DNA sequence: ACTGGCAGTCGGTAGAATCAAGTGCCAGTT
DNA sequence: AACTGGCACTTGATTCTACCGACTGCCAGT
């Protein structure tokens, strides 16, 4: 009940929200220690923590209050306290120190992004690995959607008699293909002609808005154009499904010690659609962390998710995420996710011509 | 020591290897029961098993012999027996009943392969899921390498000023791409001309054997051709790295109950190269099952791997695999792997023109 | 408002007792 | 000689008890 006015002794933390500064410090100590040791934290330890200059008895009194207000719980009487989801939330919002990535890790990220060479898919895949290696958690990368990309090339390539490959190149560098089985055999010339006509009709338009039907008077073409049209529509549809890259699933087996938890979390991660929705939801709500039940997925209630957007152009579409136990090192996870997401954004903007105002390639990090 | 001559009472199993038929039946019973229950199997239970028409006392005597010969072990005195790797091996070689896939599962496979529509990558990815759903084990699919595929198309597509995408189509339907940053801006006409020249020089040759240098006298081209050549070589190299698709990693958390085991096995599976090598090794040795330490990987010594080749054309290159505990339902795993691998082979041969003699599309299963 | 002191609460561990499963051996039977 | 029933024995698992240690909640004192 007792509400203190902000005590102004010494250089305290900037803002501690609606919590008494000392209690905030106590919560801070409990979270930090518990994250490290996975053992309930007692008043004696907390009393020694910086920012808490009182005896263990006083700490105990505050802990009772913190428990009453839902920030802490006792696993059982006469054990130390552990944070609740609400406790973690407060920690993340008000106490988590700005992103501190070890210099070794910083270098690692730098080296990674200096060396990236391949295509986007490859970069994302490897970024998910990187992220899971920077932290002890499983990583997820969702590729930016091709939203407004336009068609840059359409081509039909003959693979075998009556077997043709439709290859579509988008302005963001993505390539899609579809195999077509035709009713009739076409000569290379016919194929080339057809390719040209398709290109003329489609190049420049967005995939989703591509003309449903390529106009033609040639009586022989419809039987060919029909499967092409179908394939194009299928491609347009499949481009909506963002790719998901998963890194370091084995990290989950480190983070949890109940094998049953590992299983259920893994099996959620196998459903890519769920992962994408989860990350998007969190981002849409303007959050970068979802703790416990804050996202709606029951089986993940013992998990926390850290998300950071990957912005290409001006719409924020992709995302990187980290999945670990609620007992997670949030500062580390946030720092890692932010570094990787911003580096990724930068790289992708550079690569595909959406070059931005002129932020250059300098530090952008901070927290 | 006592070696029996084959008793010929009743319709016994075809061949029991170098083992007394009754002892083989005992081993069979132990393996089957242990796979199901994960509990050491006692002589009383085995005595009731079919093919063992003797008392538990006699079974005990035989079990002593089987243990002496290394087929069984006792976790501790006065517990039942469990099979050794050698025991499983004997079971797989001589006792495992022919592949029995439940009708529900058969239907599932059938439906899957009737519906497959997309591209090869997609099919393989989904096949790995299928396989892990047919069994309670983790599945792995290694895509056939592009070995002898020839180049069918080479094309340069402009993405942005000075940014070009090199797109290469292979005869097996694979598409590779690489982004190039050029020193100079090229007009669409120049790009088209260049594409044509590249195509003329490269189409028809194998990727690996493609001419290292496209001949030209044009003084402006070298600065463009150089990065193209580099990209081509890089593509050729990357095509060696067979893609790995992993299905149902969460199955591992079901199969093992020590979280530490789960972790180490998962982290092996994350190394795609190791997975590929492992599967190839097993296939090269002409095996379809590797139990415990039969493959050389320490961390997988509590695992068994079931492999089946995916043959495209006439060289056997791809593979499907199942990874589970040595305490694995081998008949089921073998059946599932074989069905999927042969269906995959068939589909891929159909799709990419390597149409075979004329085995048709009929049953091919059996065991 | 805070502190030291103290009784009280529980989980965790160690040791003893008991249980049940399953063995190895042996004398007896066919 | 091959097999069987019977039995003593071994040993992990389970249960129970006692006890220790960690931490708390409370209270009287500064």
Image: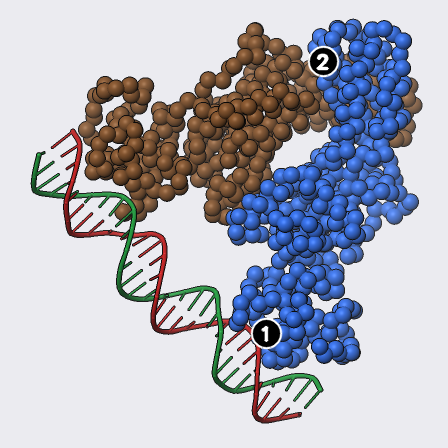
Chain colours: A brown, B blue, C red, D green
Secondary structure category for the residue under label 1:
helix
Going by the image, does A80 lie left or right of B282? Answer: left
Closer to the camera in the image, B121 or A344 = A344
What residue is pinned by disc 1? B43
The image quarter containing residue A119 is top right
Residue B181's mark? 2
In this orientation, does residue A333 appear? yes
**Above or below, comparing residue B276 to residue B46 in the picture:** above
Cα distance, mark 1 to mark 2? 73 Å
Could you say which is closer to the camera, residue B158 or residue D18? D18
* Residue B325 seen anywhere in this rendered image of the structure: no
Point 89% across, 26% down: residue: B204
Q: Which mark is residue B27?
A: none
- The residue lying at 56 percent from left, 47 percent from top is B262
- Label 2 neighbourhood size at 10 Å, few (<14), some (14-19), many (20+)? some
- Which quadrant does the N terminus of chain A fall into? top left
Query: Residue B247, position in %: x, y?
Result: 64, 42
The reply to whether the C-beta atoms of the residues labelled 1 and 2 are less than 8 Å apart is no
Question: What residue sits 76% from the left and 53% below the top?
Answer: B287
């Amino acid at each position: 009940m007792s509400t203190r006015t902000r005590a102004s002794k010494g250089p305290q933390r900037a803002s501690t929200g609606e919590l008494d500064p000392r209690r905030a410090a106590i919560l801070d100590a409990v979270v930090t220690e518990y994250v490290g040791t996975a053992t309930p934290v007692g008043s004696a330890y907390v009393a020694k923590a910086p920012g808490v200059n009182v005896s263990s008895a006083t700490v105990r009194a505050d802990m009772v209050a913190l428990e009453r207000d839902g920030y802490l719980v006792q696993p059982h009487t006469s054990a130390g306290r552990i944070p609740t989801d609400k406790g973690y939330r407060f920690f993340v919002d008000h106490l988590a120190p700005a992103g501190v990535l070890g210099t070794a890790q910083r270098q690692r990220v730098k080296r990674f992004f200096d060396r990236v060479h391949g295509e986007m898919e490859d970069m994302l895949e490897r970024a998910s690995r990187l992220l899971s290696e920077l932290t002890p958690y499983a990583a997820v990368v969702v590729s930016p959607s091709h939203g407004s990309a336009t068609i840059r090339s359409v081509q039909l390539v003959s693979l075998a008699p009556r077997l043709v490959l439709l290859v579509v190149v988008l302005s963001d560098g993505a390539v899609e293909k579809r195999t077509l089985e035709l009713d009739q055999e076409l000569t290379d010339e016919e194929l080339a002609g057809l390719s040209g006509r398709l290109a003329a009709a489609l190049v420049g338009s967005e995939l989703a808005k591509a003309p449903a039907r390529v106009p033609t008077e040639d009586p022989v073409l419809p039987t060919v154009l029909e499967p092409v049209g179908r394939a194009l529509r299928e491609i347009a549809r499949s481009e909506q499904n963002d790719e998901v890259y998963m890194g370091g699933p084995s990290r989950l087996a480190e983070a949890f010690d109940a094998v049953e938890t590992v299983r259920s979390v893994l099996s959620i991660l196998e459903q890519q659609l769920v992962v994408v929705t989860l990350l998007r939801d969190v981002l849409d709500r303007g959050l970068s962390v979802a703790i416990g039940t804050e996202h709606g997925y029951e089986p993940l209630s013992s998990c926390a998710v850290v998300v950071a957007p990957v912005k290409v152009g001006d719409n924020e579409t992709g995302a990187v995420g980290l999945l670990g136990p609620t007992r997670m090192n949030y500062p580390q996870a946030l720092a890692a996710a932010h570094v990787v997401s911003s580096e990724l954004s930068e790289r992708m903007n550079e690569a595909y011509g959406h070059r931005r105002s002129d932020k250059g390639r300098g530090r952008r990090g901070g927290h």
